[in-house]
Image (cartoon, coloured by chain):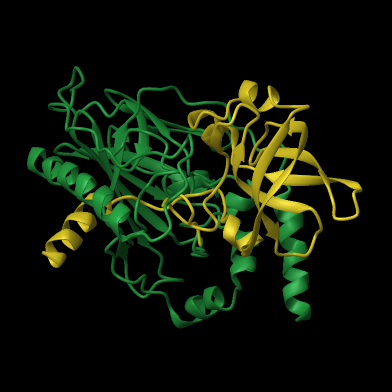
Chain colours: A yellow, B green
Amino acid sequence: MRWMFGTLIALLFAATPAFAHHSFAAEFDAQKCSDITGVLTKVAYENPHSYVWVDVKNAAGKVEASTFQLSSPSNLKRGGATYGVLNGNVGKTVLVRGCASRNGEPNRFAASFIKLSDGTLQRVGQDVEGIFGTKIWR
Amino acid sequence: MRAHIGVMLVAACAWSAAAAAQEQKPFVEARGSVKPVPLPPGGPAPRMSDGKVDLSGVWFSGPTGKANAWSVVPDVPLKEDPVPFQPAAAAKIRGMSRTERELNSPGVRCTPVGTPGMWTINPYPHQLITKPGLYVHLIESDNAWNVVHTDGRPHKGKDDLEPLYNGDQTAHWEGDTLVIDTISIDERTWINQSGWFHSDQAHVIERIRRPSMNYLEYQYTVEDPKVLTKPWTSAWRTYSLGREDLTENFCTNNENVDQLEKLNQVEKQK
């Protein structure tokens, strides 16, 4: 039964090529991911990647701007994170799942989802940690 | 094909249930994740006025007819022979760190992806338009395009050849398969994202067929006597018919190169 299941899976997906503009896992650390809450201040809906900036209070209570790299507008709009949806959250409090940059640049993250101000959990980037059961782009 | 898709549908259901049962920590449910529901075959492929298969449509990689960047899809590699690199070429590729491979990749640098990169490097959907005697390929990555005559005309003469990202191309039909033959490819392109560089002697033969209305299949062969010990042919890749238009995608804000350069420096200092 197990081999049969394996064969079925292989048949289904063997011909699905792995594609991405580039691997987020190469640039961001899957071991340094966290939920980050703050006020969304700006959206850059551009290629090859979009960015959002969030004002986050650090441990000392000081507000720091954090940069989050998202997927491309092509993927974002097809997944529901349209220009209007993201910009509609500017000025509002959001929660972002972010993985820190591996090059040590502070306050720079890859975002995999944003909990929007209306509570919607919205995919916005690659599954660096494997939390969605979707592809991890190694 | 119909039986094949039936198997795919059963597998999709089985996989969803098995994945849910086996995973200890529940996956995060978020808007945007694409479930693995394959399209049905959709009937026979349409034909053009000359009787050849019409390849026209917007095609997404994989079986769902949708963008697959966020697909709930297990990462099963394609069954392909290892690429027969010459020892020096293999050493050059092995010598690159993951960061360097990213840094040198046309996909990351937003340089033209060329042939066969329009298929192997472009992560976004493809629009094909075929007319009797003509093949037009449009992709979202940097809004690139490619036009090939499909009447079997010969390649340009030696004096007219020049290195081009898409190369010098000619095409003909072998039954219901379109065969595109490419030479004179600019050496700045890669064959795919893995670091597979090529020489000025690279010869790429691409085959495209549409086994049914909703499915397209693509395969490529590379001959390159300066890099490979013998020709190599890929597995057939599956694409499925989308119901949406391509979208504009100009690479105007590429921060990845600077970030990866910084990472490369950090790694070299370790």
Which of A98/B248 is in front?
A98
Q: Is residue B230 left or right of residue A125?
A: left
- Viewport quadrant of the N terminus of chain A: bottom left
Q: Position of residue A33 (x, y in %)?
A: 64, 58
Of residue B178 and residue A131, the one placed in the foreground of this image is: A131
Q: From this viewpoint, which residue is outermost toward the top?
A: B49
Q: Quadrant of residue B22?
A: bottom left
Residue B144 in view in this figure: no
Give the residue displayed 71% in from the left and 54% down from the top: B257
Residue lying at the far left in this picture: please name it. B3
Front residue of A20/A107: it is A107
Q: Residue B33 occupies which quadrant of the picture?
A: top left
- Give residue A86's position: percent from left, percent from top: 65, 28
At a point 57% along the width and 53% down the height, the residue shown is A22
B203 relative to B108 in the view: left or right: left
The quarter of the displayed image where residue A40 is located: top right
Relative to B244, is A73 above or below?
below
Residue B2 x %, y %? 9, 37
Task: Say which residue appears at 61% left-offset and 39% top-offset.
Answer: A114
Is B56 situated above or below B209?
above
Residue B34, percent across and down? Answer: 39, 38
